[in-house]
Amino acid sequence: MYLEQVQSYKYLESAVNSDNSIEEEIQCRITLGNKAYYTNQFLFKSRLVSKKSKLKLHWSVIRPTVTYGCEVWVLKETIKNKSTVFERKVLGKIFGPTKERDGTWRIKSNDELD
């Protein structure tokens, strides 16, 4: 009888693989965060919803989706960059660009988003 080795599987909503690598899990979490963001995109784009409400939605729905189980993650620099890029993408959509005095528009810096 020949048994095939399982390369990866889901256990308690976490991806477990034979390499004991966390990159697959984090990529899956970022994908779920994207789905949560695009599901609520009409709220983030609406001018009727305040920035404060959009931030509450981000902090209560999207961020917990991405960071579920992060207490046990060992983060490499590339993984930190991926999560920072995702966070910046969502916050950039909430706060939008900045209009300069000369009439030009620019994207907010990380310090301004913090």
Image: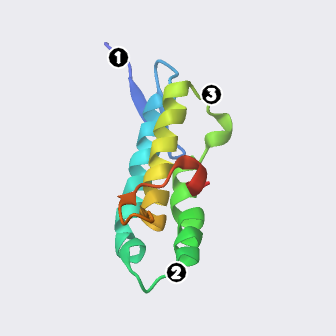
Q: Amino acid at mark 2?
A: Ser
Q: Is residue 4 visible?
A: yes
Look at the image and name its color scheme.
rainbow
Determine which quarter of the picture holds residue 70.
top right
In the image, is residue 76 above or below residue 53? above
**Disc 3 vs disc 1: which is toward the camera?**
3
Q: Position of residue 108 (x, y in %)?
A: 48, 55
Q: Earlier in the sequence, mark 3 or mark 1?
A: 1
Q: Amino acid at mark 1?
A: Leu
Asked if the residues shown at circle 1 and circle 2 are in contact, with their CB atoms under 8 angstroms apart, the answer is: no
Q: Residue at x 40, y 56 (%)?
A: 106
Q: Position of residue 21 (x, y in %)?
A: 50, 23
Q: Residues within 10 Å of mark 1 (few under 14, many from 20)?
A: few
Q: Amino acid at mark 3?
A: Val
Label 3 and label 2: CA atoms lie apart by 36 Å
Asked if the residues shown at circle 3 and circle 2 are in contact, with their CB atoms under 8 angstroms apart, the answer is: no
Residue marked by disc 1: 3
In the image, is residue 7 above or below residue 88? above
Q: Is residue 10 visible?
A: no
* Residue at the farthest right position: 71
**Disc 3 vs disc 2: which is toward the camera?**
2
Q: Residue at x 53, y 64 (%)?
A: 58
Give the secondary structure at mark 1. Answer: loop
Residue marked by disc 3: 74
Residue marked by disc 2: 50
Q: Earlier in the sequence, mark 3 or mark 2?
A: 2
Q: On the rendered structure, is 60 left or right of 15?
A: right
Q: Earlier in the sequence, mark 1 or mark 2?
A: 1
Observer-nearest residue: 25 or 34?
34
Q: Residues within 10 Å of mark 3 (few under 14, many from 20)?
A: few
